[in-house]
Amino acid sequence: MSPARILDGKATAAAVRLEVAAEVARLRTAGLAPKLVVVLVGEDPASQVYVRNKDKAAQEAGFEVRTLRLPASATQAALESEVKALNADASVHGILVQLPLPKGLDADRIVRLLDPRKDVDGLHPENVAALVMGGNGLRPCTPAGCVELLDRHDFALEGRQVVVLGRSMLVGKPLALLALERNATVTVCHSRTRDLAEVCRNADVLVAAVGRPRLVRADWIRPGAVVLDVGINRLPDGKLCGDVDFAAASQVAGAITPVPGGLGPMTIAMLLSNTALAAARQAGLEKDSLLFRERR
């Protein structure tokens, strides 16, 4: 069997970002300057890197971008006050609170406090409810990036068996709902799933999002299946790897995402897409956009 087709998230994300930049230019021509504010609390090194990458990508796409930095010692009340101020600021169209927050801060409370129209991470209960009910909310970025990557490589989900490893609110659960929306048959696996490897072998599309380095081995994969590796883990030698044993799996799968360079870039691209969508909706300009066409 030939080695798997590599689903290049970098190249695909670049295409999405070009479309977002065109949409931002359209909004600016209409007199609207889309603005994203990223709230960063503390000095977590990984969060610092993520925020820099998001800021750079947003600026390149034409957004106005501001990073609001608070010390790790910031109180819950202080953070809530900042979020309320951003909610009330009509010039701000997207708010992203970088997670995880330092210990002692209630992230769930902060997410619930966000104006759902500006919640570009798609985590507010109103956006989650819209996803469950097929409504018009903002979709979580990583799951949306998974679906977008499949779309742009012509992998239709309709009628497919999709197996999702992981049931987090960030990836597993919303991705399952997005796949159901595309008429896939979905199985969500977790730590209590019996005979996990056998369940995985039934998948036409296998998504790994559990945060365990190289958990998914080649013999877990149906020959020719599509494998999306959402995990990103740092090994003792400093190298990054996913939740899938890439070298072995790529000899069995039909298509596979690399780590890094797979779904990480897609997540940022969909964040930008959400921000442009949020700005267009708040200004009543969504109907004229080609970026947000219905793709079900």
Image: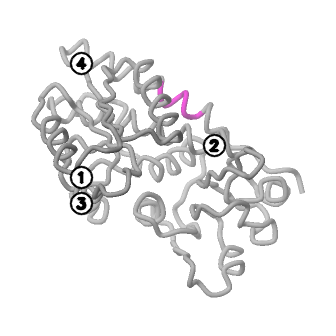
Q: Nearer the viewer, residue 289 or 79?
A: 79
The amino acid pointed to by label 4 is: Ala
Residue situated in front as seen by the camera: 272 or 64:
64
What whole-number distance in Å separates the C-alpha atoms at marks 3 and 4?
27 Å
SS assignment at label 3: helix
Q: Residue furthest right?
A: 1
Between circles 1 and 3, the one closer to the viewer is 1
Q: Identify which residue is drawn at 33% across, 21% down.
A: 63
Spatial CA distance of label 2 from label 3 is 28 Å
Q: Position of residue 269 (x, y in %)?
A: 47, 35
The magenta region covers 12-17
Q: Residues within 10 Å of mark 1 (few under 14, many from 20)?
A: some
In the image, residue 46 lies in the stretch drawn in magenta: no
Instruction: Determine the residue positioned at 51% across, 62% down.
Output: 158
Residue 16 among magenta residues: yes
> Which residue is at the front of the view, 174 or 185?
174
- Circle on res. 125: 3
Q: Secondary structure at mark 2?
A: loop
